[in-house]
Amino acid sequence: MSDWKEELAPVPGCIEIARFSEELNEAERAHLETCVRCQTELALFREIDREETSAEETEATEWIAGELRRRNNVVAFRPKRMRVLYAVAAALVMVIGIGSFMQMREPSIDVAINDTANYRSARFDVIAPIGDIAQAPNELRWNVVPSATRYHVEVVEVDMTHVWSGDTTQSHIALRADVIAQFAPGKSLLWDVKAFRGNDVLASSETQTVRVSVPSVRKDP
Amino acid sequence: MDELLTAWQEAGEHQKRGAADRLFASYYERVGRWCFRFTGDRESAADLAQEVFLKAHRHLDSFRGTSQFGTWLYSIVRNEALNRTKRSSVPMESEEVLMQIPTLEPDPEELASRGSSSRRLHQFLNTTLDETERTVFTLHYGDEVPLDAITRMLRLENSSGAKAYIVSAKRKLARAVEKLFVRGEKL
């Protein structure tokens, strides 16, 4: 089955999924005629994005949207008086909760604040590659994050299709030849890196967009 | 919705977060529906949608407006949904049944191992299988999506769902390969 996975994987020239709602150009239409992968993606997109909706789907969709609003604290419009009541109720719950916690907790002992706290959710800078570059990179490099024991690097396409990911204990990671080949001229790829200590994320880089502007063929020394 | 995208694009640094939240909130229903169609249950769909919006938020700067924003979100939903389906899949009874189907030599694995070029292989699949068989075949063997998930995603209403299409596809491929061999041709 693994061989089929390779044979049916997207190849250069495959249509970006995000393009399926646009009018395809001539080259894309020609490619679609012959590419089973793109035909499948288009069929799946049409099926998942169909307008016809069952009663079960409508009900589920409303529940999911409500759940997302709840989780993300997006408050739908309510009359002002109700909002004030909600705010007072929330404040009361918080005061009672904090009070209970203070009463119930055990006497504190002094614990040194470790570096994890300092770096949690922090950002750190990558070094290279960034933006438009002359040739495909051999490696990805970033600044050291103190206390990090591991870095996880991910390269994706602009539509978030996974290209490659790897882990290292260094502040750089070499790219395999097949990954380097993905940095084709004119094609944008995104990459970022997360610094870990154990399973805790200490810091994350901004997502970098990289595009090779010339052929990526490298000469032997 | 496009107005919200424009508002986010034009927002100042301090307004970006709020503008992004409003933009994403306008897609809760649509993304929720897609996620439900991929997962088949609302709790998993809500978790999936949450993950999708987190990813989209993280990569929002990379959206360059070359496609509709909604379809860009769909591509994230699709990737995340299929990755989750693969991660959670366990060997299924339907797979075991497929493995036991006799007289289907050469099977798809052997076909691929012959190292035929992708283009010829795609042409072969195009001429041998019908559209639904190709779609089911590609999702199952190319993306490793379990058959029950394919049945749900594609709303296949026949009694054995995607399994029937896989069996039919393998049978057709085996026959077509035999014909090639008889003519002394290679795939």
Image: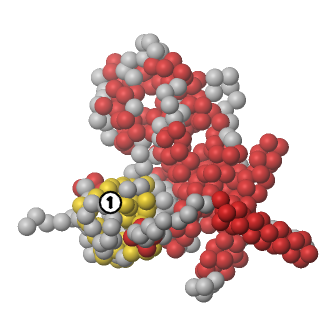
Tell me which residue sits at (50%, 24%) in the image.
B95
Image quarter in which the N terminus of chain B is found: bottom right
Vertical relation: B142 (above or below) B160:
below
- Residue A147 lies left or right of residue B21; in this view the side is left
Marks counted in the figure total 1
Residue A117 spot, x, y in % from top left? 45, 70
| Residue A210 location, quadrant | bottom left
Q: Compare residues A30 and A106 and report the one nearer the observer.
A: A106
**Residue lying farthest left?**
A221
The colour style of the image is: secondary structure
Q: Residues within 10 Å of mark 1 (few under 14, many from 20)?
A: many
Tell me which residue sits at (76%, 57%) in the image.
A66
- Residue B120 lies left or right of residue B168; in this view the side is left
Vertical relation: A123 (above or below) A13:
below
**Residue lying farthest bottom?**
B12
Report the residue marked by disc 1: A150
**Helix, strand or loop at disc 1?**
strand
Mark 1 chain: A
Identify the amino acid type marked 1.
Arg
Tell me which residue sits at (67%, 63%) in the image.
A103
Q: Compare residues A154 and B95 and report the one nearer the observer.
A: A154
**Residue lying farthest front?**
A107
One can see residue B8 in this view: yes
Image quarter in which the C terminus of chain B is found: top left
One can see residue B168 in this view: no
Residue A69 spot, x, y in % from top left? 73, 62
Tell me which residue sits at (54%, 41%) in the image.
B85
Residue A204 spot, x, y in % from top left? 43, 68
Q: Compare residues A89 and A111 and report the one nearer the observer.
A: A111
Residue A62 spot, x, y in % from top left? 79, 53
